[in-house]
Image (cartoon, coloured by chain):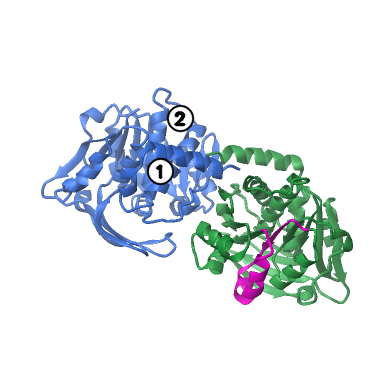
Chain colours: A green, B blue
Amino acid sequence: MPLVVTGTIGIDTIETPFDKREEILGGSCVYFAAAASFFTPVRLVAAAGEDFHDDYQAILRGFDTIDVAGLELRTGSKTFAWGGKYFDDWNQRETLFTELGVLGEHPPKIPEQYADSRFVFLANSHPSVQREMLKALPERVFSVADTMNFWIESARDELGKLMEEIDGLIINDEEAHLLTGVRNPITAAKKIIAEMGPMFVVVKKGAHGCVLVHDEGVAVLPAFPVEEVVDPTGAGDSFAGGMMGYLAASHAKDMNVSLASIQQALAHGTIIASFAIESFSLDRLASLTKEEVAKRYEYFQEIAKV
Amino acid sequence: MPLVVTGTIGIDTIETPFDKREEILGGSCVYFAAAASFFTPVRLVAAAGEDFHDDYQAILRGFDTIDVAGLELRTGSKTFAWGGKYFDDWNQRETLFTELGVLGEHPPKIPEQYADSRFVFLANSHPSVQREMLKALPERVFSVADTMNFWIESARDELGKLMEEIDGLIINDEEAHLLTGVRNPITAAKKIIAEMGPMFVVVKKGAHGCVLVHDEGVAVLPAFPVEEVVDPTGAGDSFAGGMMGYLAASHAKDMNVSLASIQQALAHGTIIASFAIESFSLDRLASLTKEEVAKRYEYFQEIAKV
């Protein structure tokens, strides 16, 4: 089942407690698409500037199930650039710089051939841009959005309108607290479902796994234990990509996405994210095989059995 | 298989963001014994003062599989008293007061009829007291200890000696970091196993579940999602009690405690702890039935499936 993702392409400069990389490929849409591509073809919609040179594009094209027809390369513009620094415990990061570039311009256009997309993921961007994307995808049957603190604080009304139109929301525990005023992630997610529109909410807890609250019930998942974290950038987007990719692949015909189905998809998202953080940028995902994914998932089932 | 626990009996005064209780029954040994009693008979070794009146004793005696022959009531002494305050996010607590009472005196004596105990839990106390207890239990085949920041900092050598003699250590993530200098809980636990003696380490992450590292491999468990936390005091001891009680019951004849066996025991510890925090003191555990435990475990298996 075609899965479309819209979000950012970024050129990242990242400092970790152990290493540093300058101007590497990043962005929510990029991590998501790479992660989802292990399960299903992905259609990418995003804009980049003329500094998004061939080397970056080649990495994306290396994932042969990513359709880049929706990649808009804008002459005279700059790609979104982000600099971030991680500290000892990985749980906090500092933004060193943000250069909006194309993100400050009009949103990218969705190619006509994407119009039949049924599964939609709106990676983090302005809620009104996310809504505009949704409108351009009239055949959608299952749409999920990510957001962030910044939009919860600065674009609350637009975010509210978006939430009325999506099936699922993926946020982290701090964002769930900010959005609802409720600290318990399960209670916060229930409030979002009861009052704001989505049928399910996934609350990510970083290195501590996630909780899923759905119309039909709840699920709790530990993270996959990674000892050698190299760069956690893109972990959330890889997680979402693995989840949505698995769902789109599992629901090629039956569009009825159940709690159990999402629960299993989250475990696959967890696995892809665990690989993504083992390297900077897409390095690990670029070399990853479906067999490695299947093997780690099997191992995860064993070590996470209760 | 007889399980013996030594640790503290406490008279607690607790403030939460929502409520307050004065002079209620608490202590590591008490929570542990109540939790373990759902699976196996428990032998308690602990001291209390003459202020440990009938009402407190009656609560303990209400758990009919707790053997209180090892409860030492000392005339002229005072029971250990602790006052604590929890904040909005439950993750931090402040100690308001500590009155050592009997804990400042000689340790309790292990009754002769306990000498054949095979499963031993050393709840948090001075490592040299924990070692002394171990020595008095020559028939032990499986011993596990808890400890805390205070002893890691102030009694490092004694703790080191204790660790050479136990099979398992239960600590929280901060303690694992303090003990090893390593922040990743899996890596820290591996270091403890490689360098300090235990065959396995359980690292508790509070509301985020736990990880188990064992000679044979690892396991990861989410916490059971509790929305209405009333008082988290004793959660760790209830968790340990459920785990050890389940292990002692499962290994009535076969003393070979495997990774898979501990993994399943941790899930049962998780369930008992989830009940314990639904009330102050032992209130919820006192009314809890084995059927409720079995039902919640079955539900946990469903929602934690990956």
Residue lying farthest top? B253
The number of discs equals 2
Q: Earlier in the sequence, mark 2 or mark 1?
A: 2
Residue B115: image location, x then y, percent: 26, 28
Q: Mark 1 belongs to which subunit?
A: B
| Span of residues in magenta | A140-167
Q: Nearer the viewer, mark 2 or mark 1?
A: 1
Q: Mark 2 belongs to which subunit?
A: B
Q: Which residue in the structure is indicated by mark 2?
A: B257
Q: Nearer the viewer, residue A247 or B183?
A: A247
Residue B13: image location, x then y, percent: 27, 58
Residue B80: image location, x then y, percent: 23, 52
Q: Secondary structure at mark 1?
A: helix
Quadrant position of residue A107: bottom right
Q: Give me the residue at 32% from left, 29% from top.
A: B2
Say if A233 sits above or below B104 in the image: below
Tell if the residue under mark 2 belongs to the same chain as the one under mark 1: yes
Residue B62 visible at all: yes
Q: Are dots 2 and 1 in contact, CB under 8 Å?
A: no
The kind of residue on which mark 1 rests is Ile
Q: Secondary structure at mark 2?
A: loop
Residue B3: image location, x then y, percent: 33, 33
The kind of residue on which mark 2 rests is Val
Query: Rounded to the nearest whole Å, what is the CA distance between mark 2 and mark 1?
Result: 21 Å
Q: Which residue in the structure is indicated by mark 1?
A: B272
Q: Nearer the viewer, residue A208 or A219?
A: A219
Q: Residues within 10 Å of mark 2 (few under 14, many from 20)?
A: some
Say if B130 sits above or below A21 in the image: above
Q: Which mark is residue A171?
A: none
Which quarter of the image is occupied by the C terminus of chain B? top right
